[in-house]
Image (tube, rainbow, N blue to C red):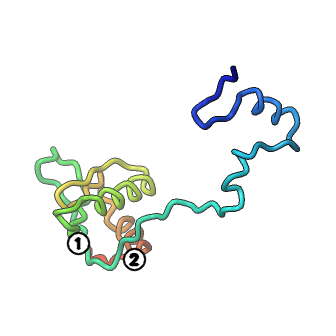
């Protein structure tokens, strides 16, 4: 009795292939001619966003607020917030159609959002 894994490939055949790479299993060659596609990145942009500096209720600390996203669906705001936080190397959050970036990063945020295809206005 042969022991098979979930795909139906015998582990001994896989080990033999490592030792002899010219031998290929029929199971592994299925789909080998199909091109590999990278996952599609969501396409956003075209919206007019307002960039505001906020200090209230933060014990004197500044925060950059980006407003103007759809309040019903936060997926766009979450994706843009993740890209901004990673590019700027800072913390922040996204909820309710707004993105909060820690610190006064209005000019940096505006240039990054313009590069993503958004129209921005610094207030």
Please identify the residue farthest to the front as the structure is shown: 1
- Residue 17's place in the image compared with 31, above or below, is above
Which x, y percent locates residue 122?
26, 73
Q: Nearer the viewer, residue 7 or 113?
A: 7
Please identify the residue farthest to the left as the structure is shown: 57
Q: Nearer the viewer, residue 49 or 43?
A: 43
Q: Secondary structure at mark 2?
A: loop
Residue at 17% x, 54% y: name it. Answer: 55
The picture quadrant where one finds residue 97 is bottom left
Residue at 31% x, 65% y: name it. Answer: 106
Disc 2 + disc 1, Cβ < 8 Å: no
- The disc placed on residue 50 is 1
Which x, y percent locates residue 100?
25, 55
How many numbered markers are drawn? Answer: 2
Q: Mark 1 packing: few (<14 Cα in 10 Å), some, or many (20+)?
A: some
Q: Secondary structure at mark 1?
A: strand
- The disc placed on residue 73 is none
Residue at 28% x, 77% y: name it. Answer: 47
For residue 102, side relative to residue 117 (left or right): left
Q: Nearer the viewer, residue 51 or 55?
A: 51
> Mark 2 or 1 closer to N-term?
1
Q: Nearer the viewer, residue 91 or 83?
A: 83
**Residue wearing tag 2:** 117
Which x, y percent locates residue 22?
88, 44
**Distance of label 2 from label 1 (alpha carbons):** 14 Å
């Amino acid at each position: 009795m042969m022991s098979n894994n979930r795909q139906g490939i015998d582990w001994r055949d896989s080990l033999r292939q490592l030792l002899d790479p010219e031998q290929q299993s029929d199971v592994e060659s299925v789909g080998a001619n199909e091109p590999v596609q990278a996952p599609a990145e969501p396409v956003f942009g075209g919206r007019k966003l307002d960039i505001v500096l906020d200090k209230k209720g933060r014990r004197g600390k500044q925060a950059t607020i980006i407003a103007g996203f759809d309040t019903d669906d936060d997926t766009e705001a979450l994706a843009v917030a993740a890209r901004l936080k990673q590019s700027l190397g800072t913390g922040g959050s996204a909820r309710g159609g707004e993105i909060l970036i820690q610190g006064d990063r209005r000019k940096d945020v505006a240039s990054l959002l313009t590069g993503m295809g958004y129209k921005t206005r610094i207030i």
